[in-house]
Amino acid sequence: MLLPGAVSAALGLVPPAGADPATDQLRQYQDLSNQLEQTSEQLLDAREQLKSWQAEVDRANTDLAQARQAEDRARAAQEAFRGQVDRLTEASFEGARLQQLSALLTSDSARDFLARSAAIALLARDNKDAMDRLSAAADQAADARGRDEDARNRAEQASAAAARLIAGIEQRQRDLQAQILAVRVALGRLAGPVRAGLISVGDIPVVTAPAGAAGAAVMFALDQLGKPYVSGATGPNAYDCSGLTWAAYRSAGVVLPRTAAAQSGVGIPVSRDDVRAGDLIFYYSPVHHVAIAIDHYRAVHASTEGVPIKVASIDSIGPRSAIRRISE
């Protein structure tokens, strides 16, 4: 959230006694720009988390519907097998289930006895089968009820988490708009030569990019020089920092996460001494800025509001926190 003091500084209130006004204004602009990008990345992170929670809500609701359908089928099976068991039980009470001795005493011949015995055995098997099926249907219904309850709880928890994220996103969006305004005002307050240097694209380097995805990503990023920084943008007319690196590698057939923090976990770590074209350079802690190296010394990045995409020294962009090689 933008602090009242930072807003006041951006609006041009008198700097502390003894401070150099030009230096102080530049520092205020840089601080506000850093806050702006941090909020922008937090907003993107929250939106990505929201997608995950919304997907979980969808999965839980699908599981809930399937569990309820399974419970309905199990209950219908219970009713069907219960009726069969009831009929067999009634038949037993009416004398259909005779003892082997009764069958022998009432039989006129050995063949008649065997026939009656087979019928009694068949009735017993039918009764056991119906009882087994009734028991299995009851177990299935109980399992379906358990899955129903689990899915319902998951859906409720995911919906609540999504609602909290939405509220946080709305607040961050308000913060972001205030910070954008403050940065614009601070940029306008800078001394002419300083502001001119910031809004200039600067020298456009001639780079021989390596082969493969890294080289393709570098050339794509360089093709975007001069385009504006816009929070949340992924091109083709504007970018934010992670939007530029995401789009650059996407053009090379490599899918990166959307945010700088998530991108910092991709690929393999590289030391500063080993940096080469295509490596991603991450700044600040926690990570909220990223640039793509075009050689061992320079990187192209989308820095902040009011400043176009440009090339800068890797070591001048900010405090480095990680370097990752995405593709050989």
Image: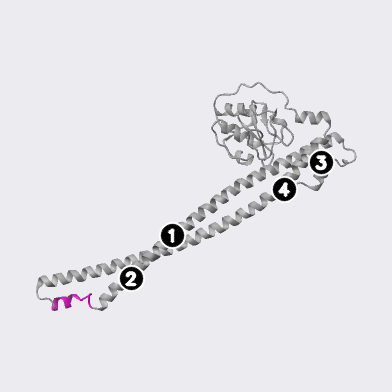
Q: Label 4, on which residue?
A: 174
The span picked out in magenta is 95-105
What amino acid is at disc 2?
A: Gly
CA distance separating discs 2 and 4? 64 Å
Q: Residue furthest right?
A: 17
Q: Which residue: 66% across, 21% down?
A: 206
Q: Which mark is residue 69?
A: 1
Q: Which residue: 60% across, 32% down?
A: 248
What amino acid is at disc 4?
A: Arg
Of the pair 124 and 237, the residue shown nearer to us: 237
> Relative to 63, does residue 96 appear above or below in the rendering?
below
Q: Quadrant of the C terminus?
A: top right
Q: Residue furthest left?
A: 109
CA distance separating discs 1 and 4? 44 Å
Q: Secondary structure at mark 1?
A: helix
> Relative to 45, does residue 197 appear above or below in the rendering?
above
| Residue 79 in the figure: left or right of residue 12 | left
Query: Depth-wise, is mark 3 or mark 4 nearer the camera?
Result: 4
| Residue 247 in the figure: left or right of residue 121 | right
Q: Label 3, on which residue?
A: 10
The answer to whether the residue labelled 1 contacts the one labelled 3, judged by CB atoms less than 8 Å apart, is no
Percent position of residue 197, x then y: 78, 28
Choose top left, top right, bottom left or bottom right for residue 90: bottom left
Q: Which residue: 77% across, 39% down?
A: 183
Query: Depth-wise, is mark 3 or mark 2 nearer the camera?
Result: 2
The answer to whether residue 125 shows anywhere in this view is: yes
What amino acid is at disc 3?
A: Ala
Which of the two labelled residues, at mark 1 and mark 3, occupies the earlier sequence position?
Answer: 3
The answer to whether residue 277 shows anywhere in this view is: no
Q: Secondary structure at mark 3?
A: helix
